[in-house]
Image (cartoon, rainbow, N blue to C red):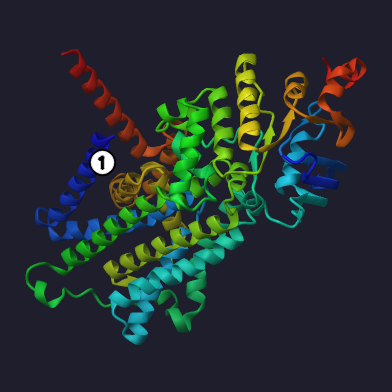
């Protein structure tokens, strides 16, 4: 068991080191793209909490990206609030709306919850366009770029700075999520997902935990949306449509909903799959998303994350056997 | 143990699934420290009765647990009062490990030391739990899952445990082992047991009192040995 712990922390440390040194070996634009990967990974981490751990479906997480993005954009534009204040507020705003939606979700099971959140995703762009006075309508809101703080001036580019901020946040969220999912709270969520009657018989309040999961998940999506808006330096209604929501769900399913590594893989997929697919045909990304979703749910329901994990496990077992024989 | 002090008293208990009433006003008494069997064929209302007691099903009437009205309490609060429920189909949390399942059972105990102490006590009844504690519970055999479900329900130090068909799908030798453990838990720890069973012979041998359900009503009740000793009752109601 100690070996396993060493291995687990070892692999986490290795990935963290890789992320830390990577910007120095790739062009600045690469760091810019990887910032998006980090942001999407944080958003998908939210889906892992919601769908993977608590068994609720959201096809509308793009709406929480919008709340996060517009919170930092409007606070910056109208009140000049700096990002280090507006980013936590984005998480808070999105989280509170998520709690509210979580209360609604209690009344909706499975397919109905999927449909309701789908409607939310569809309604988000037009809602943003409608409240023109606040949101700037379809023009969107321009954000000021993130400035490199004084001491680091000249040492790293703004792209690299945002990259480090994003991945530090991602690291903190991964660690916190891992701890929380292995605590009493995480076990309660798992129990509710696996067998609600049993969970309730242990004294778990299903309403409270399902609502918490929604708020928690939405807060992550809010942070992710804020980072995307800062990186793009622009928040526009059409960026938060159904396409984003579906991309997040696809990333989560392909990456894997039952391991946190799935969020990392999902982030890479959401950022790079459309870019690769566009080389084939401008319409290819959505077709490839659709086909991949179908194939994965049939042949690889645990996603790439679980497939990699079981591949590693079997390699390890085989290695162990050889060891025993020699 | 003071004789005939009622721990649970249900009066005119009705339960419904949507429009359909499944339990038509039953009276049920479970004395402190006793084992009571709830018998009857498939669909007679055994599972519904247990679910109505915990609140997992919509119910009306009166349920006094230790002289306290339980109707109106949410199911998770009923658990906190000290009623554990081993649901139909064992309720195994298959992706969680054996230990995590047991920890879930102790969900209402916020003190980690108390949880640990409970675990040590239950390992004395089910020694194999310690050997397999890190395994996913879904990999256990049917009998092991049933024992895990019972152990898990006992983690919360319940005063009353409701068991829904613990013998279902298990080999007779496993059933008699599980019933033996139930008897020990009842005798040594004073846990009161209400057990719904289709296996009438085994349940009557275990229980002090028995109720026979027929389409949502109590058809008859009495001391187990009276029911088991009456050939006519055995043939017409219990099918053995």
Q: Which of the pair B54/A278 is nearer the observer?
A: B54
Which residue: 23% across, 56% down?
A34
* Mark 1 secondary-structure assignment: helix
Is residue B96 in view?
Answer: no
Q: Residues within 10 Å of mark 1 (few under 14, many from 20)?
A: few
- Work out whether B129 lies above or below A70: above
In this view, the residue farthest toward the right is B232
Left or right, A230 with reference to B198: left
Front residue of A209 and B31: B31
Q: Image quarter for residue B6?
A: top right
Residue B194 shows in the view: yes
Q: Residue at x 61, y 36 (%)?
A: B189
Residue A37 in which image quadrant? bottom left
In this rendering, the answer to whether B227 lies above or below B71 is above
> Residue B10: image x %, image y %?
82, 46
Most distant residue in the bottom direction: A79
Residue B169, given in percent of the width and then of the height, sits at 64, 21
Tell me residue A53's x, y (percent). Answer: 46, 47
Q: How many marks?
A: 1
Mark 1 sits on what residue?
Answer: A8
Which residue: 49% across, 25% down? B140
Quadrant (top left, top right, bottom left, bottom right) of the C terminus of chain B: top right
View extreme (front): residue: B2
| Quadrant in the picture for the N terminus of chain B | top right
* Residue A122 position (above or below residue A307): below
Along the line of sight, the residue nearer the viewer: B8 or B48:
B8
Residue A60 % position (x, y): 49, 58
């Amino acid at each position: 068991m100690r070996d396993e712990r060493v291995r687990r922390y070892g692999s986490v440390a290795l990935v963290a080191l890789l992320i830390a040194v990577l910007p120095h070996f790739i062009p600045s634009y690469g760091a810019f793209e990887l910032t998006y990967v980090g942001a999407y990974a944080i958003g998908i981490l939210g889906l892992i909490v919601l769908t993977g751990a608590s068994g609720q479906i959201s096809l509308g997480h793009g709406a929480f990206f919008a709340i996060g993005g517009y919170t930092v954009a409007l606070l910056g534009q109208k009140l000049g609030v700096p990002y280090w204040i507006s980013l936590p507020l984005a998480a808070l705003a999105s989280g509170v709306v998520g709690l509210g939606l979580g209360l609604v979700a209690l009344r909706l099971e499975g397919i109905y919850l999927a449909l309701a959140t789908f409607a939310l995703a569809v309604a988000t762009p037009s809602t943003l366009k409608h409240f023109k006075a606040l949101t700037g309508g379809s023009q969107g809101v321009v954000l000021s770029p993130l400035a490199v703080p004084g001491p680091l001036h000249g040492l790293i580019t703004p792209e690299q700075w945002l990259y480090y901020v994003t991945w530090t946040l991602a690291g903190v969220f991964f660690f916190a999520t891992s701890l929380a999912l292995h605590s009493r709270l995480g076990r309660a969520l798992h129990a509710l997902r696996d067998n609600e009657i049993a969970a309730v018989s242990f004294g778990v309040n299903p309403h409270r935990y399902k609502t918490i999961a929604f708020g928690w998940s939405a807060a992550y999506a809010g942070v992710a949306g804020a980072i995307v808006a800062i990186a793009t330096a622009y928040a526009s209604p059409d960026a938060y449509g159904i396409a984003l929501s579906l991309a997040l769900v696809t990333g989560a399913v392909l990456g894997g909903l039952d391991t946190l590594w799935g969020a990392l893989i999902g982030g890479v997929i959401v950022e790079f799959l459309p870019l690769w697919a566009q080389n084939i045909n401008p319409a290819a990304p959505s077709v490839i998303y659709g086909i991949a979703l179908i194939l994965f749910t049939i042949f690889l329901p645990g996603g790439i994350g679980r497939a990699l994990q079981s591949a590693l496990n079997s390699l390890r077992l085989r290695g162990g056997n050889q060891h025993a024989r020699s | 143990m003071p004789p005939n002090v009622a721990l649970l008293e249900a009066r005119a208990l009705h339960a419904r699934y949507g429009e359909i009433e499944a339990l038509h006003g039953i009276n049920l008494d479970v004395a402190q420290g006793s084992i009571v069997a709830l018998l009857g064929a498939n669909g007679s209302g055994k599972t519904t009765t247990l679910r109505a007691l915990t609140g997992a099903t919509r119910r009306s009437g009166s349920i006094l647990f230790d002289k306290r009205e339980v109707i109106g309490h949410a199911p998770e609060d009923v658990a906190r009062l000290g009623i554990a429920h081993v649901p139909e189909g064992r309720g195994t949390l298959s992706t969680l490990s054996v230990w995590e399942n047991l920890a879930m059972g102790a969900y209402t105990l916020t003190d980690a030391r108390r949880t640990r102490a409970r675990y040590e006590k239950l390992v004395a009844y089910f020694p194999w739990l310690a050997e397999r504690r890190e395994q996913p519970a879904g990999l256990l055999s049917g009998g092991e899952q049933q024992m895990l479900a019972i152990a898990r329900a006992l983690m919360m130090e319940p005063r009353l445990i409701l068991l829904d068909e613990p013998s279902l799908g298990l080999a007779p030798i496993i059933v008699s082992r599980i019933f033996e453990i139930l008897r020990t838990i009842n005798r040594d720890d004073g846990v009161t047991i209400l057990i719904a069973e289709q296996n009438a012979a085994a349940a009557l041998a275990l229980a002090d009192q028995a109720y026979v359900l027929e389409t949502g009503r109590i058809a008859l009740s009495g001391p187990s040995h009276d029911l088991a000793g009456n050939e006519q009752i055995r043939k017409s109601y219990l099918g053995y």
